[in-house]
Image: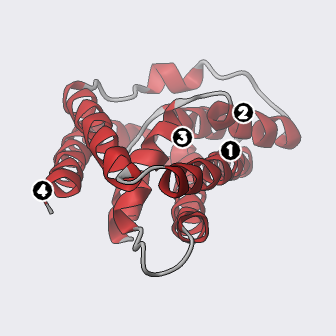
Amino acid sequence: MGVGVLVNMAPGADVAFAMSCGLAGGTKKGAVAGLGVGLGVFFHIVLAALGVSAIVATFDGGLQTLRLIGAAYLLYLAIRSWVAAPITETYAIKAPVLTIGQAFLRGALVNVLNPKPILFILAFLPQFIDPTAGPAAFQILYFGVIFATTGALITAAYGAFAGRVARRLTPRLGLIHKATAVLLFGLAFQLVFL
């Protein structure tokens, strides 16, 4: 799941939110916002586990169909990541000052109300499912918990350190986007051909 860690390092709406909270409210609020984002991912992991197990149980070739759909979505994300503009400091500074509880709750809502995480999870996690290793739902939950936990910790770190490193980190976000695009393209290739 080292790939999951690299994917979690890619900046997106969740990282932008955590960094915004860190810049506006300090390291603690940035970290808490990142942990809230992780809670939102757990919500999607449960939905994915239920959906993947239902598809695999209902259809012959359901897992292969999910893999192909997932590969197409990963290619889409790779292209978007390749052409993405870096998150700027001015974007992050626009965040309102929130309480710790508001930062956590809004961090969770960033992912709960966004359909993209479940699409990514459905695209990413099925490649790790082994039909002979037990129920697909348990495997999705297992890998999903690892993915969500690393994502929450990484996003919390982005938020916590945003105030200190924003000026130095911003120029490197473009490179992170490019590396993420290459990684996502590789995952899509693996889903289809390996």
Place of residue 41 in the rendered image (x, y in percent of width and height, measured from the top left): 62, 48
| Residue 168 visible | no
Q: Are marks 3 and 2 in contact (CB under 8 Å)?
A: no
Q: Looking at the picture, tell me which residue is in the foreground, 18 or 75.
A: 75
Q: Which residue is mark 3?
A: 118
Q: Are marks 4 and 3 in contact (CB under 8 Å)?
A: no
> What amino acid is at disc 1?
Gly
Mark 3, residues whose alpha carbon is within 10 Å: few (<14), some, or many (≥20)?
many
Q: Which residue is mark 2?
A: 109
| Quarter of the image where one finds residue 87 | top left
Mark 1, residues whose alpha carbon is within 10 Å: few (<14), some, or many (≥20)?
many
Up/down of 119 relative to 48, above or below: above
Mark 4, residues whose alpha carbon is within 10 Å: few (<14), some, or many (≥20)?
few
> What amino acid is at disc 2?
Leu
> What amino acid is at disc 4?
Phe
Q: Which residue is mark 1?
A: 40
Q: Secondary structure at mark 4?
A: helix
